[in-house]
Amino acid sequence: MFVGYQAVYDESYLDALDFAREARFAYVQFDLNVPRFYLDDLTPRELREIRSCARDRGIGFAFHAPGDNISLFTDYPAVREGILHHLKAIIGQAQLVQARHLTLHPGCYPTFRTVGSDTGDYLRKYGSYYGDVLYQNLAARESRDTLARVLRNASGRPDAATGRERPHLNAASPFGTRARELEVEGRP
């Protein structure tokens, strides 16, 4: 078993790698929700330098894809296109630097509620629609080459609160671990 930590409060990539080495963590998972860890402005050369620094320290590294306010359940075309474009770029960058793994949370589906209704009413009525949206977004041309392999292992399992089946995605990782609920962890 390998123990790592999620870098959120560190000042830089190098600061997190140094801390991981000092604390004897096996790897660092950089949280890409944190502005100082955004990959957008890093060149391939800068990314390779981060990889080299990690190797020099004997530390592995991984990425946690942005998940705040990003949802693969979105069906609005312009938003969907932007999200898929950004995730494809992140997956490409993770592949470039041979990240240990990439954690991707697909986000949340809408949970509208009317007066006097159960919070699960909307999901019971439209759950299959949003399941289809998730499937389509993962299998879309923009993401098909990098994400669709996850769908090969898709299954359902009962939701503890409603007893209804909910989407569950499993992705193979180097250590045979499984994703939980809609969290996908595996090699990018």
Image (tube, rainbow, N blue to C red):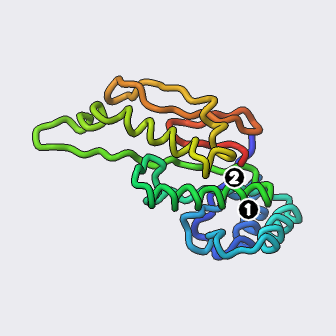
Q: For the point 66% across and 51% down, which residue is it?
A: 102
Q: Horizontally, is 29 left or right of 82 in the view? A: right
Alpha carbon distance from label 1 to label 2? 8 Å
Q: Position of residue 163 (x, y in %)?
A: 35, 23
Q: From the viewer's perspective, is residue 39 above or below residue 64?
A: below
Q: From the viewer's perspective, is residue 117 above or below residue 146?
A: above
Q: For the point 52% across and 45% down, which residue is it?
A: 137
Query: Which kind of residue does numbered mark 1 sit on?
Result: Ala
Figure quadrant of residue 56: bottom right
Q: Position of residue 106 (x, y in %)?
A: 50, 47
Query: Which kind of residue does numbered mark 2 sit on?
Result: Gly
Q: Earlier in the sequence, mark 1 or mark 2?
A: 2
What kind of element bears circle 2? strand
Looking at the image, which is closer to me, 140 or 39? 140
Q: Which residue is mark 1?
A: 20
Q: Position of residue 74 (x, y in %)?
A: 42, 50
Q: For the point 57% across and 30% down, which residue is it?
A: 154
Looking at the image, which is closer to me, 181 or 144? 144
Residue 4, which numbered label?
Answer: 2
Q: Position of residue 29 (x, y in %)?
A: 67, 57
Q: Horizontally, is 112 left or right of 104 in the view? A: left
What kind of element bears circle 1? helix
Asked if labels 2 and 1 touch by Cβ distance under 8 angstroms, the answer is yes
